[in-house]
Amino acid sequence: MIERLEATLEKYNHLQEELTKPEILSDIKKTREYSKEVAALEDVVTCYKKYKKVLEEIESTKEMTKDPELGEMAKEELKELEEEKERLDGELEILLIPKDPNDDKNVVIEIRGAAGGDEANIFAGDLFRMYTRYAEKKGFTYQVYNSVEGTAGGYSQIEFIVKGANAYSLLKYESGSHRVQRVPVTEANGRLQTSTATVLVMPEADEDIEIEINPSDLRIDIYRSSGCGGQGVNTTDSAVRITHLPTNTVVTCQNERSQIQNKEQAMKVLKTRLYEMQLREQQEAAGAERRSKIGTGDRAEKIRTYNYPQNRVTDHRIGFTTKNLDRVMDGDLDDVINALIQEDQKRKLKGETEEVWQ
């Protein structure tokens, strides 16, 4: 581990030095790239410097234990230093886990009502509220780019972008099938019903990601918007649907006021979809490694149940249960997400897989 830490420190110092050179500072792309790498190494380097200082203090304190006057006091101090060393050992192990290169990206989330008719659409709306409340609590922002409202409320489909530092690192665990058990508002006889909604979470393909899109591979349709979005909606042909013919990937954007804005947003989302497909191909090529993951990230995989009569939320991938369903639905997802992160780290430390959730 020490060799890796020394190599990390050396790389960090080299990048810091590079960032002082005029030829680097004059290159915006390189400056951004190097600054990003420095930021990624910052926590490891800070922790390692503390670790090295503790090791030095342990050695000097060991010498002090031989002193007849200061020996007892030194032994107490040595015990505290050994405990601090052990704590930093654990922290460094976690910090050295290879990071997902997409963790710092914004996320594109798609929620669809699935099995359960109107109740599934209502539940999809509840999930949308849960995620947007969570985003607000984290200081993130969100923007809906496409939505189709359900006839009894909620959404049969809603697609939105969440923007914020490390948004994907937190929300990437949410892809899959979410199941709700409750008496629907549409149920006249008060019978308990199980319905599902599916969630797909993708890292936004930002400007650093190179995805080649040939204009001749696109079919672009313009039509009248049906969602909310301002005075221009429903009165002009502002909605945009882009079909990527080679992959049959369809993206719709109708929540901006103008056709130009909708087209720009749709192209960004298309790039994200194609990037996500590229990532999945790479993961599937890993074969057995991907099969060892707790969650595949597929829409069809049942990942979580929300049981209203018992006020209980259960994540089936790790067997995590909380009796705070009302708080979870109000966006208090920290306990659930932290449990997933900790289990993810635990498995990575055991060397089971490079990524256990997506």
Image (cartoon, helix red, strand yellow):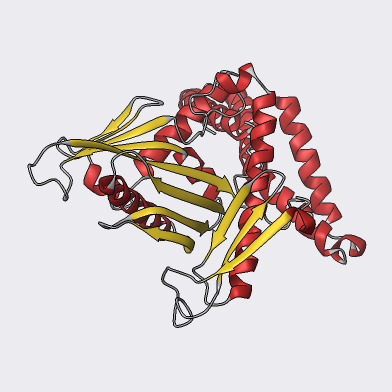
Quadrant of the rendered structure where residue 99 is? top right
In the depicted structure, whether residue 193 falls above or below residue 141? above
Q: Residue at x 43, y 48 (%)?
A: 111
On the image, the x and y values in percent for residue 55 come to 63, 29
On the image, the x and y values in percent for residue 67 come to 56, 23
In the depicted structure, whether residue 147 falls above or below residue 283? below
Q: Would residue 257 be seen by someone viewing this image from the given angle?
A: yes
In the depicted structure, whether residue 8 falls above or below residue 33? above
Q: Nearer the viewer, residue 92 or 171?
A: 171
Q: Residue at x 27, y 49 (%)?
A: 118
Quadrant of the rendered structure where residue 358 is? top right
Which image quadrant: the N terminus? Answer: top right
Count numbered badges in the picture. Answer: 0
Q: Residue at x 69, y 31 (%)?
A: 282
In the rendered image, the residue lying farthest to the right is 23
Q: Would residue 67 be seen by someone viewing this image from the given angle?
A: no
Quadrant of the rendered structure where residue 181 is? top left
Q: Nearer the viewer, residue 275 or 260?
A: 260
On the image, the x and y values in percent for residue 88 come to 55, 32
- Judged left or right of residue 190, residue 326 is right
Q: Residue at x 55, y 59 (%)?
A: 252
Q: Nearer the viewer, residue 45 or 316?
A: 316
On the image, the x and y values in percent for residue 103 come to 59, 45
In the rendered image, the residue lying farthest to the left is 189
